[in-house]
Image: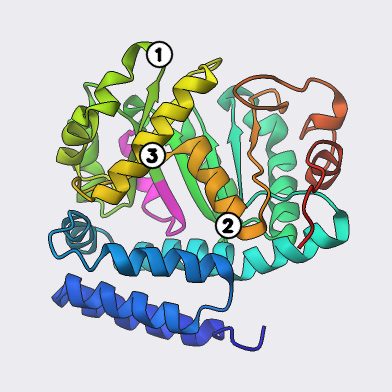
Amino acid sequence: MKNRMPRLFVETIVKKALKSIKHSPERGIRNLIDFALQFSDGRFQRDFFTVAQTMLRNENSAYYNLIRDAITYADTEKLYTFGINVGYNSCTVGAKRIRENEKVLGCNIPWTICVEMDSKLFEKNQQKYDDLIFEGESLGIYTWMFFVPDQPGKTFSLIKKHPDSAFCVFCDPKDITLRFLEEATTLNNLMVVIRYDDNITDVCAELRANKMLYSIWYEYGQKNTEIIINGDLFDSVQEFSPIFSVLIPEKNCLREVRQVIYSTVKQIRLDQSYSTIAWDLQGDNCLVDTIISEDACFVYFNKKGNLCDYEKTFENGHHNLFRSSITDILLNTCTKQKVN
């Protein structure tokens, strides 16, 4: 694209901006967004940076506290690498590649893929996961969300092999061991996302001490929506200074409940009252996808490799990542309704 900033230029500007933000978060982040908006050549980039620019005109925005905190504790190389992989590789170059491939293939391609992993079966299927990421990158997918309920450190060898992608690894506080931290600190393209529970205080302190990027996730269902709607959850979570507070619905959570929660999340972001970014896993992943290529496409594979969502699971070989390529799966299940 003729207006696109060359990667080397982008890297230089981002590194310079990170130094500036350390001295003056408010001015530094506004200057970075103004610059990005000036050179944005796609609808997604323009829309995103325009909204960010408008929000940060609010001098009382709690997001300035978030930015100031992250730039203070987090390793600069991790901020830079993860930011480049999401902002440039995924949402700029990757977004363009996604649109081009959608036109050729006639199917939707998600900007991110969620994968649930069973640590006991990981070694058996590691090559399949590796193939998935290589193929996904060729399609334009550079952001990955792994859900690993036990021994999440097993995924690190996979993450290391794909330095151009950004990985969010969702796990439990009990899994943040010394060995986990030793290995995780070597990965600049990783964000650890910890389940919110009573043991999170010490875990977040350890992640901060190791200068790692981290967020928090919270599972909700019909019985615990009030704590989200009235803001108590975000008020409590922000004490641990996570970059994102990710909301994930329980399996079989009613669509009506998910819609109410997503409306709440969007309003909370607009209010800018909490120093953490509220993110609804399904709603916001679909929102980004819609901006990139009009049709929303949410792709989640369970630990058996089956494609699924919060209402159904596909259990034949045409929808299983261990039996079919991601391209074939998308061709079988995500037909493009609107072609750009």
Rendered residue at 73%/42% (across/down): 127
Rendered residue at 41%/56% (across/down): 186
Rendered residue at 60%/57% (across/down): 142
Query: Which residue does the numbered mark 1 point to in the structure image?
Result: 222
What kind of element bears circle 2? helix
Rendered residue at 72%/50% (across/down): 109
**Gap between marks 3 and 2 measured at Cα:** 25 Å
The answer to the question of whether label 3 and label 2 lie on touching residues, with beta carbons closer than 8 A, is no
Query: Which residue does the numbered mark 2 point to in the structure image?
Result: 291
Report x, y in % for residue 95.
Answer: 63, 64
Whether residue 49 is situated above or below residue 173 in the rendered picture: below
Q: Amino acid at mark 1?
A: Gln
**Gap between marks 1 and 2 measured at Cα:** 29 Å
Q: Amino acid at mark 2?
A: Ile
| Mark closer to the chain start, 1 or 3 | 3
The answer to the question of whether label 1 and label 2 lie on touching residues, with beta carbons closer than 8 A, is no
> Which dot, 3 or 2, sits closer to the camera?
2
